[in-house]
Image (cartoon, grey):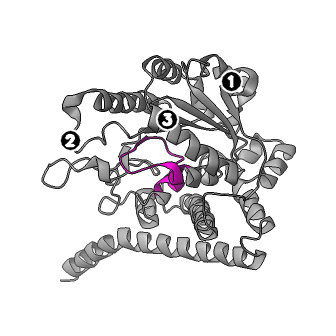
């Protein structure tokens, strides 16, 4: 069974309140501003390199709504919005990692490039934390698609906790009712470990939810040169769940359709969680407003027509239009949210920059005093 979601934007029986919808919009705006600031900080010499999740904000707030404490994420460097939405990262911490701040980067102590996230599994005394009470993140790695095998292992562990009576009373699992959520870019689905994981998940029938963020490009390479039929969900059709329930349930979603994303991710993750069945969410028609990273410019390899389409179908722009068209907020109210998000992101940047530089200034002052004597 392949579930295909259309362009419906009806609000009848929508699972979120207007306040929750505007919270999601606000978070999307904050995350986008952080991405824009990231590029400026690198190009002005304050950071060495930057990579961010701009263009992926809307599906990630929808995913955050569907996840539950106890779930594990195994992802990659486009997931800042998800981390912000789950409360696992503050904007100051995001910028601290960008600045390689060893004291205030909680994910890697300034050792990894930015947007590489993790959560602790033990406390300061080396005792296990209760993983059932938190959202859990397996430490991100830079080798693309490497997160797939790790996610499969986490999903298999959940299956073991559900089926083994001796593993029912532990701080690691809620009786196997947690998910392993893995995020991956569409280009990395061409790697062998992706296909090995998909096949193993289908064979083992484990609670693995695969999120494919598809913006049409692998760095500068369009997907027509790297994905058969230019659609990973089409190629995966042979894995699709049959009438007997064997296989993987596949969802095809457009990354700029907020209401469909909220509904289908909630339904899909609940199905995966309840039945311990693997699912794939192919989130297509996403964009990358600043290109792949701070090391290049997408204007060099995208056509004028493609760039115009990306501006029109930017997920936040479409989210904004849906909010206004459905009377959830006025244009003036939306403009105010966006402006406040911009100011908030700048304030967080300034605090993070001050935090990483203050110790250096103090050491410099001591040295100057030493030589002055």
Specify the farthest residue to the left: 125
**Viewer-closest of 239 and 46:** 239
Report if residue 19 is visible in the image: yes
Q: Is residue 80 magenta?
A: yes
**Viewer-closest of 95 and 361:** 95
Residue 227 numbered tag: 1
Q: CA distance from mark 2 to mark 1?
A: 42 Å
Name the element at disc 2.
loop
| Residue 351 screen position, x and y as percent | 43, 74
Read off the magenta span: 63-83
Residue of label 2: 170
Q: CA distance from mark 3 to mark 2?
A: 22 Å
Quadrant (top left/top right/bottom left/bottom right) for the N terminus: top right
Report if residue 143 is visible in the image: no
In this picture, is 347 found above or below 178? below
| Callout 2–callout 1 Cβ contact below 8 Å | no
| Residue 62 screen position, x and y as percent | 58, 52
Name the element at disc 1.
loop
Residue of label 3: 272
| Residue 86 screen position, x and y as percent | 45, 57
């Amino acid at each position: 069974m392949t579930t295909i979601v259309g362009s419906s934007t009806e609000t009848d029986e929508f699972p979120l309140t207007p306040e929750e919808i505007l919270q999601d919009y606000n978070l999307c705006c904050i995350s986008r501003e952080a991405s824009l600031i990231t590029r400026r900080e690198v190009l002005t010499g304050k950071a060495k390199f930057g990579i961010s999740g701009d263009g992926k904000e809307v599906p990630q707030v929808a995913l955050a709504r569907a996840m539950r404490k106890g779930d594990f994420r195994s992802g990659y460097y486009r997931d800042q919005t998800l981390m912000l939405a789950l409360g696992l990262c503050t904007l100051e911490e995001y910028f601290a990692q960008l600045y390689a701040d060893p004291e205030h980067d909680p994910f890697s102590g300034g050792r990894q490039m930015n947007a590489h996230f993790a959560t602790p599994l033990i406390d300061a005394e080396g005792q296990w934390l209760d993983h059932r009470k938190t959202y859990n993140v397996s430490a991100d790695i830079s080798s693309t698609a490497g997160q797939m095998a790790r996610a499969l292992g986490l999903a298999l562990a959940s299956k073991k906790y559900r089926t083994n009576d001796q593993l029912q009373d532990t701080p690691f699992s809620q009786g196997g009712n947690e998910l392993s959520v893995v995020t991956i870019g569409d280009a990395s689905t061409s790697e062998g470990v992706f296909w090995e994981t998909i096949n193993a998940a289908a064979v083992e029938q484990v609670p693995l939810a695969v999120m494919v963020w598809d913006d049409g490009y692998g760095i500068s390479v369009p997907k027509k040169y790297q994905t058969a039929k230019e659609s990973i969900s089409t190629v995966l059709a042979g894995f699709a769940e049959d009438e007997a329930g064997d296989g993987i349930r596949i969802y095809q979603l457009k990354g700029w359709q907020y209401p469909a994303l909220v509904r289908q991710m909630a339904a899909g993750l609940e199905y995966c969680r309840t039945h311990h069945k693997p699912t794939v969410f192919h989130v297509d028609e996403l964009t990358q407003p600043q290109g792949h990273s701070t090391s290049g410019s997408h204007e060099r390899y995208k056509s004028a027509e493609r760039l115009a389409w990306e501006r029109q179908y930017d997920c936040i722009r479409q989210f904004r239009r849906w909010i206004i068209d459905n009377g959830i907020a006025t244009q003036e109210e939306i403009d105010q949210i966006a402006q406040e998000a911009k100011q908030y992101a700048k304030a967080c940047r300034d605090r993070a920059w001050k935090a990483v530089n203050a110790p250096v200034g103090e050491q410099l002052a001591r040295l100057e005093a030493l030589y002055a004597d």
